[in-house]
Amino acid sequence: MGKGFGFGSFVLGGLVGAALGLLYAPKPGVETRAEVAEKIDELWGQSQTIYNQSVTKIQETVANVQPVIKKQNDELREKIQSARTLIADQVAKNAVAARDAINDKVPVAAEKVSQVADVVRGQIDNAASALRSKAAAVAEGDAVEAAASAAYAAAGEAAPATATAKQAPAGESAPAAQ
């Protein structure tokens, strides 16, 4: 049996053995009762001795184990604190690296936006100039050709020669603009 049943088994075995011995012994009742009382006192003393020894052993074991547990607990706390510090340092480094990356990219992006804005501004100026010249042509009476040319200019294309003039059948001249 395991260690946990040793004391209980010992006491139980002692009681059973004493009871059987007394029951089968050919003695008078007074002697038997006296013997039983003596055996019970003897077993009680032995059980108290074993109990006291067990309590002492358990207390010694607890006293020996407590410093080891405390030391391991302190070591674990130190490792946890060290890990927290390392994580916090790494997070700070990552934040600085991210900020530096953003600071490096923002001026480049701003320059590209400025370049695109300049290109768009130039295209708008060209389209406005083309519209002004076509408006002047409309004022002179060439409205159909001016409107088509303005549309092509706004799209950034050159107007084809046939897009604005109506073609007359062979031998006839084109109608005049009104």
Image (spheres, rainbow, N blue to C red):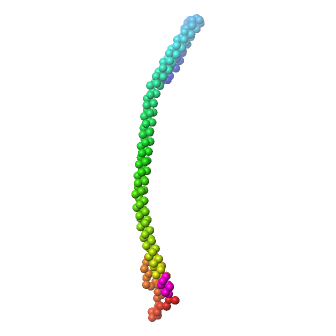
Rendering quarter of residue 38: top right
Q: Is residue 102 above or below residue 112?
A: above
* Most common secondary structure along the magenta stretch: helix
- Say if residue 148 shows up in the picture: no
In this orientation, does residue 82 appear?
yes
Can you give x and y, in whole percent of width and height, for residue 137 in the image? 47, 84
Residue 139 falls within the magenta-colored stretch: yes
Residue at horizontal 44 percent and vertical 25 percent from the top = 64
Residue farthest bottom in this picture:
171
Residue at 40% x, 57% y is: 104
Residue at image position (49%, 90%) is: 176
Residue 105 position, x and y percent, is 41, 59
Q: Does the segment drawn in magenta span residue 99?
A: no
Above or below, 66 relative to 175: above
Decide which of 116, 159 is in the foreground and name it. Answer: 116
- Residue 4 higher or lower than 107, as above or below: above
| Residue occupying image coordinates x 42% and y 40% | 82
Towards the viewer: 131 or 160: 131
Residues shaded magenta: 135-144
